[in-house]
Image (cartoon, helix red, strand yellow):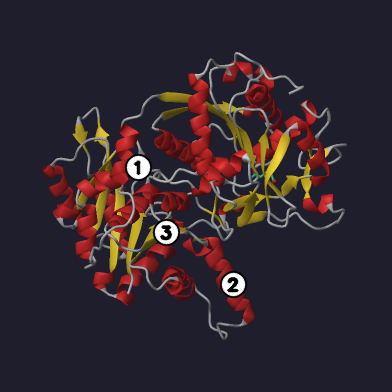
Amino acid sequence: MAKYIFITGGVISSLGKGIASASIGRLLEEAGLKVTLQKLDPYINVDPGTMSPYQHGEVYVTDDGAETDLDLGHYERFTSARMTRANNFTTGQVYDAVIKKERKGDYLGRTVQVVPHIIDEIKGRIRKLVELDPNLDVVIGEVGGTVGDIEGLPFLEAIRQFRLDLGWQDVLYIHLTYVPYIRAAEEIKTKPTQHSVGTLRQIGIQPDILLCRTERDLSDDVKRKIALFCNVDPKAVIQAKDVDSVYKVPLLLAQEGLGDLIIQKLALTARKHQGTPLGEVIERMEHPKGTVKMAVVGKYIEHQDAYKSIYEAIIHAGFHNSVRVEVTKVDAEKIEKDGPGLYLKDVSGILVPGGFGTRGIEGKISAIQYAREHRIPFFGICLGMQCSVIEFARHVCGFDKANSTEFEPETPHPVICLLSEQQNVKNLGGTMRLGASPCELKPGSKVYEIYGRHRVMERHRHRYELNNGFREIFEKNGLKVTGLSPDGVLAELIELEGHPWFVACQYHPEFQSKPDRAHPLFASFIQAVVEHQGREKGSKVMTNDK
Ligand code: GLN
């Protein structure tokens, strides 16, 4: 029977609850246990698919096409658990399900209430993961938000009842808290932690383990004080000190004895771990052979979480190539104002990520033109691929007004459009293509060589496609479609002939990159960046006539 660990957060947000949960998953996996993770989100949106990346960061897409919280990205990067739509749910989904049942008459005329109906729906969704995979040893549930939030109460009540339903030894509560150092007093303060644990206890949850996020080492005295006032075992006061890389968190927590403590408290039996220990990856990370510089040109540049998986995939590709990658984040709108040279002259690689809407598009197109003409390695992802097709159509094929119908519905050269528009079907489309689907690679192409396979599965989140009416003309001019959906209809990958590294994909490879298994496209791109930086940069400008 699976055991459950619930992780709550206290004092303030942004303490890294997602990373802490994922790290605990990793620790247990390295003890040979089969784990999965789930994010319980108290907000009312049904899913984050419609939320602004400024507010919510990246929308993480699972294999089965769910648009989920970015913490699921951490879970997949840190563990081998595969996320599905069952691994993330929100208050919105819970109420939606309960109200639908009420409308169908499932409650037989009873009054429908938060307790028990909403709570039971939450508990059912937590139990679902074990129904889907009976071989799980541990389910780790991360409760979003901070203890004390009004909207989080039903979730806390549900996890409180879980221990009564299952038994004391089968459920563990871990609380992530903040222990600040007050410079003026030159002291570490435990009071916020005491208050936050106090609030949890009022709800009926006594945490078993406290993870104390701190800038400074916590002395034994401080740990004893926290243990005393929060009513936990002194051994269960675990320090979570700030680190320079999230991938070090599992190692630090292991050193603090967290893995063994959980195993002991839940009476689990550790087994032999298959796979690379994270320590080996860190070893490579700590000794890079050098630093390379690249740029990410996007719209949500100021928000550090908006392209989370992209930045992580770049870091993994750096580990793979034993280099540190310095990423300059360039706002596409600035390129529109000042031109690309100012921002891109010192970089050895340019990546344009996905996105929606018109803002910044022309800046992205200029950046891609700069990469193509200066023979700088270029990697386009989703919208980045679509912009590279527009750029090529305009500046190489001579279709001056080429555009995507997303940005210019009346363009005379709709090189990117909806599939329904290509097939002259009205009122179709408008729905997003979401989740994993197969892509077949053209033998002899660069991407075939990179993946070393004929067929790959990659995740999508987009509506628009390359217009097949232009495929022949693109191919003639040197833009090759080298990956296609198995029916040959959807262009999944393009690459530019005669350029050192110019590859773009319609899907999102960043969702499948891991610290110990960099995604092949990212690994190859960073290798090209390393090579470019090693060569005399920009000595020969590629012209439009190839
Ligand atoms: N806006 C584009 C589309 O819907 C690209 C989407 C993306 O980059 N995720 O097709």
Q: Secondary structure at mark 3?
A: loop
In the image, taking residue 19 as reference, residue 371 lies left or right, namely right
Total numbered labels: 3
In this view, the mark in front (2 or 3)? 3
Please tell me how crowded label 3 is: few (under 14), some (14-19), or many (20+) other residues with Cα within 10 Å. some
Packing grade of label 2 (10 A; few <14, some 14-19, many >=20) is: some
Residue that appears at 77% across and 22% down: 545
Question: Mark 2 or mark 3, which has the lower sequence index?
Answer: 3
Check disc 1 and report its element: helix, strand or loop: helix
Residue to which mark 1 is pinned: 247
Q: Quadrant of residue 159?
A: bottom left
- Residue 24, numbered label: none
On residue 81, the disc is 3
The disc, 2 or 1, on the residue closer to the chain's N-terminal end is 2
- In-image side of 95 versus 213 (left or right): right
Q: Which residue is mark 2?
A: 99
Percent x, y for residue 203? 33, 63
| Quadrant containing the C terminus in the rendered view | top right
Q: Alpha carbon of mark 1 to alpha carbon of mark 3: how far? A: 17 Å
Amino acid marked by disc 1: Tyr
Question: At numbered mark 2, what does the secondary structure look like: helix, strand or loop?
Answer: helix
At x 40%, y 56%, the residue is 80
Q: Mark 2 to mark 1: distance in Å?
A: 41 Å
Asked if the residue at label 1 sits under 8 Å from ligand 1, the reply is: no
Please name the amino acid that badge 2 sits on. Ile
| Amino acid type of the residue that numbered disc 3 sits on in the rendered structure | Ala
Q: CA distance from mark 2 to mark 3?
A: 31 Å
Mark 1, Cα crowd under 10 Å, few <14 / some 14-19 / many 20+, is some
- Residue 109 seen in render: yes
Instruction: Tell me if I can see residue 58 in this picture.
Output: no
Q: Residue furthest front?
A: 444
